Amino acid sequence: MSLTETLLAYNKKSRERIPAASLAIMDRATKALVNENIINNSIKKGDTLPVTQLVNAKGEKLDLGKLLDNGPLVISFYRGGWCPYCNFELRALQQIQPELKQLGANLVAITPETPDNSLTTVEKNEIAFDVLTDYDNSYAKELGLVFKMPPDLQEVYNAFGIDVEAHNENSNFELPMPATLVVGSNRKVLYSFVNEDYTKRADTVAILEALKQLQLA
């Protein structure tokens, strides 16, 4: 089953479990993001990726520019290890890592969670690639990926036992939209998936196809 199919199946079951009032707030928040056209200001195919240094789950600094010097780079922005959709995505990316390496590509995931929390996510999902902390979503903001959770959605998450403030060690209640980029060594974005709907993710087939097209170019 593809990642897209897995997420659809999980979402269907999840919506049956979530109280109607909470579900309505969650759906309204997603619709508001769509109506704001926030995605129109996010990084797109053909853009040049700004690079930065971020810290991985072990506290080591990684330079995205240096990674790109070694070949293409796949970057996945995710909300946090508390998000089941994010965990499905991370495991799917782990499964295709050998193929990514064959295609000469590196892979990193970026989250606003602190290194301690991202380390838990790495261990839980048996991730072998680097998960980087984007403190206060600073880098994601530069790419136009960040939104602020409305107060009623904050209350829903708190009721679910999801402490976003603790995971990110701030009180901003800001999260990145799900986003996946495939970037060439020249820092040009070859493929960009950004979605206001937190239940959606780039399918691994599309990621691999973008890298294969790069090889043919």
Image (cartoon, grey):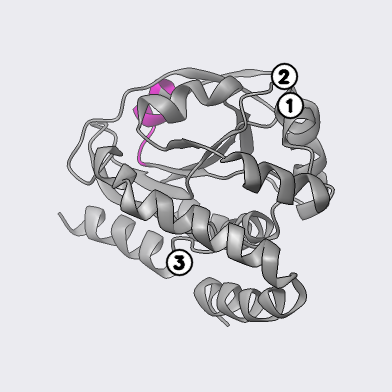
Tell me the crowding category of disc 2: few under 14, some 14 to 19, or many 20 or more residues within 10 angstroms, Cα based. some
Does the magenta-highlighted stretch encompass residue 69? yes
Judged by its main secondary structure, the magenta piece is: helix
Q: Dot 3 lies on which element?
A: loop
Question: Could you tell me residue 183's position as x and y percent?
Answer: 32, 41
Instruction: Give amino acid for label 2.
Output: Gly
Q: Which residues are magenta?
A: 65-72
For label 1, the residue is 115
Mark with earlier residue (3, 1): 1
Q: Dot 2 lies on which element?
A: loop
Mark with earlier residue (2, 1): 2
Q: Disc number at residue 59?
A: 2
The answer to whether residue 12 is visible is yes
Residue 72, picture quadrant? top left
Asked if marks 2 and 3 touch (Cβ < 8 Å), the reply is no
Quadrant of the image containing the C terminus: bottom left
As measured in the structure, the alpha-carbon distance from the residue carrying label 2 to the one carrying label 1 is 7 Å
Q: Dot 1 lies on which element?
A: helix
Asked if marks 2 and 1 touch (Cβ < 8 Å), the reply is yes
Instruction: Give amino acid for label 3.
Output: Asp
Q: Disc number at residue 138?
A: none
Q: Disc number at residue 203?
A: 3
Between marks 2 and 1 in the image, the one whose residue lies nearer the viewer: 1
Mark with earlier residue (2, 3): 2
Tell me the crowding category of disc 1: few under 14, some 14 to 19, or many 20 or more residues within 10 angstroms, Cα based. many
